[in-house]
Amino acid sequence: MQIFFQQVINGLSLGSIYALLALGYTMVYGIIKLINFAHGDIYMLGAFWGYYVINVWHFNFVLALLSAMVVCGLSGVIIEYLAYRPLRHSPRITALITAIGVSFFLENGMSYLFGSNARDFPQAVKQVNYNIGGVRISNIQLEILLTSCILMLILQLIIKRTKMGRAMRAVSVDNAAAELVGVDLNRTISFTFALGSAMAGAAGVMIGLYYNSIDPLMGLTPGIKAFVAAVVGGIGSVPGASLGGFLIGLLETLVQSIGLSAYKDAVVYVVLIVILLIRPMGIFGKNVKEKV
């Protein structure tokens, strides 16, 4: 039982990172029906920004986290403005290919500018381990879990209780009708990208602190897993993305704990296939019928 609870703690810490990433996927898809495959690379930018400000400007964890959220939020807005907005009325496959192109551009651009080698992330928080009933919990795991939950709660409040949140919900239902009642479509979409990218930036700083290693390709696999989490929870659903992230994190750590570390990624994709076969709309997704 101690091993089980230890893996649950590890899974929740990792799952909170996937949940933050999945939120960006699900919000963007809910607004403009775009799968933003460059989202994982925004997470990488957040990790590198945290690496820079902690090493050079000696920021503490909180300042590094907040500044990464701002920088990544701005990056998301710029990418949406330059790459996605001109293609808004194009076929979806065009925007999807563009998203993949933006992903490659960010990965290879960072590799060219900073090198492709992994580098150690500075430990802005001194690690302290607590032993509770034979289960070891570090202060870094607690900070990651608590920070992620706070950010998810703030995001939910923004969506449910603010004017911009109401605009986002209106655009997700019918963007043409939302424009007719005075919603600024471009501003709402840009705000959605900023929110999702800010969450990814925060996740990048926290994963650097958790694993103590970053590299320009670090966003590829977590980005795909976060997309799986969004699909499992119900893409377009914010609570579903959060739940899906935690489930994927728990599944991955439990698979590792039984000695199948080599298959941890494969298991995630098997879960995706099973969900698509059994419940294509995800756990919290709605089966919406479209009129022809």
Image (cartoon, rainbow, N blue to C red):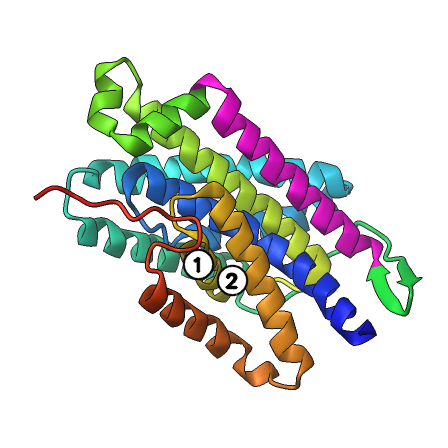
Furthest toward the top, the residue is: 182
Q: Is residue 63 above or below residue 106?
A: above
Number of the label disc, if any, that sits on residue 232: 1
Does the magenta stretch mainly form a helix, a strand or a loop? helix
Q: Which quadrant, please, contains the C terminus? A: top left
Question: For the residue carrying disc 1, how many other residues have a C-alpha within 10 Å: few (<14), some (14-19), or many (20+)?
Answer: many
The amino acid beneath tag 2 is Pro
**Residue visible at 54% across and 52% down?**
243
Q: Is residue 143 visible?
A: yes
Q: Is residue 67 visible?
A: no
Q: Which residues are magenta?
A: 138-163
Query: Number of labelled discs?
Result: 2
Tag 2 residue = 222
**Which secondary structure, mark 1?**
helix
Which x, y percent locates residue 9?
74, 62
Task: Give the side of residue 240 with respect to residue 140, left or right.
Answer: left
Q: Observer-nearest residue: 14 or 284?
A: 284
The foreground one among 129 and 172 is 172
10 Å crowding of disc 2: few (<14), some (14-19), many (20+): many
**Quick one: 212 or 228, which is closer to the camera?**
228
The residue shown at (71%, 59%) is: 210
Q: Is residue 277 above or below residue 182?
A: below
Kind of residue at disc 1? Val
- Whichever of labels 2 and 1 marks the residue nearer the N terminus, that label is 2
Is residue 215 inside the magenta stretch?
no
Q: Position of residue 61 (x, y in %)?
A: 75, 43
Q: Residue at x 83, y 59 (%)?
A: 138
Q: Nearer the viewer, residue 232 or 39?
A: 232
Mark number for residue 259? none
**Where's residue 127, x and y in %?**
86, 57
The residue shown at (24%, 20%) is: 179
